[in-house]
Image (tube, rainbow, N blue to C red):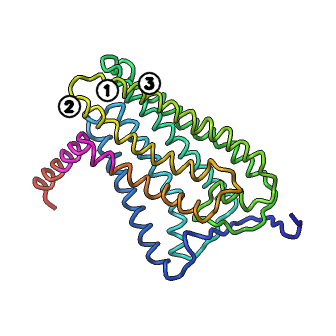
Amino acid sequence: MDQGNKTFIKYFIIKGISDVPELQLPIFLLVLLIFLTTLGGNMTILLLICTDHQLHTPMYFFLANLSVLDISCSTITLHKALLTFMTGDKLVSYVSCLLQMFFFLSFTCAEVLILTAMGFDRYVAICNPLRYRTVMTDRVCCGLAGICWVVGLLDIMPCLLKISSFTCYSSSEINHFFCDLVPLMKVSCSDISSLQLYVMIEGVFLSAFVPCMLTFISYVFIIRTILRISSSIGRRKAFYTCSSHLTVITLLYATLAYQYFRPIDYIALETNKLSSLFNTTVVPILNPLIYSLKNKDVKSALKRRLNISKHVFKNHPI
């Protein structure tokens, strides 16, 4: 690329979800509604798990971690989009852009690993129910969650270091609504071949393929055990407890595969932006809905909290 077209920048311009003036207000209201619903739903799940002793089990411990990650991902990505709608300021500093990309990818990687840990939890619960309490101890659960968080942060560190070493960009405008890996690679005029290789090998293999295969193996044993259950009611109950988890991982893996696990030359930024929007809005909002609407324990805990609140307000009126 000609040196005259190369730009050394301190700020990026975030193009946003859409630059059509007539769509600005509807998009802002829709994104704001989704963001508030995501925060409200995941905060409700998190508070129920923290305050209700009947939800102090390994399954809900991992679900609480998932809610924290969903809140973090939505806040990191959507806050800038909402501020841009309100202020019109599309500038983001170079350092802030890299940090936004780093934390979003780190939390996404940690979410994949947490879902893998949840698959292992379901495997032990269904395939070895008598040993469940001795295997899934508090120490084991905290250790698994800690590994997921740490690996998520360390896994993306090479991407951050490589991108921070890029010396120039062909444009300061990022065709996205937040700083993501693919749009940054698209506007870089530095050599991105090593980063592409890292993303394809390490990102696909360690961050996606290995967790996916571990989850798949867990469910092979789970399904085999379920099919051996003589009672049809027992089989339905077992499948029911796993269906929420399967729904979430299917949605997450599908969107991540479409966003990142393709050669960059074949990725169109407009369609990539739409898939990112789905991943950062729809998936986090579906998690609390799936786990609350399909989960009797969560619904029972919510009813207990509401009854306690009614009792408190009745005895101590404002």
Circle 3: residue type: Val
Position above or below: 187 against 198: below
**Mark drawn on residue 226:** 1
Give the residue furthest to the bottom.
22
State the image coordinates of residue 87 (x, y, percent, origin top left): 54, 76
Q: CA distance from mark 1 to mark 3?
A: 25 Å
| Observer-nearest of 312 and 4 | 4
Determine if the magenta segment contains residue 24. Answer: no
Amino acid under disc 1: Ile
Tell which of 243 and 48 is nearer to you. Answer: 243
Gap in angstroms between the C-alphas marked 2 and 3: 31 Å
- Lower position in the chain sequence, tag 1 or tag 3: 3
Going from N to C along the chain, the mark reached first, 2 or 3, is: 3
Give the vertical position of 129 relative to 78 (above or below): above
Quarter of the view holding residue 223: top left
Which residue is disc 2 drawn over? Answer: 233
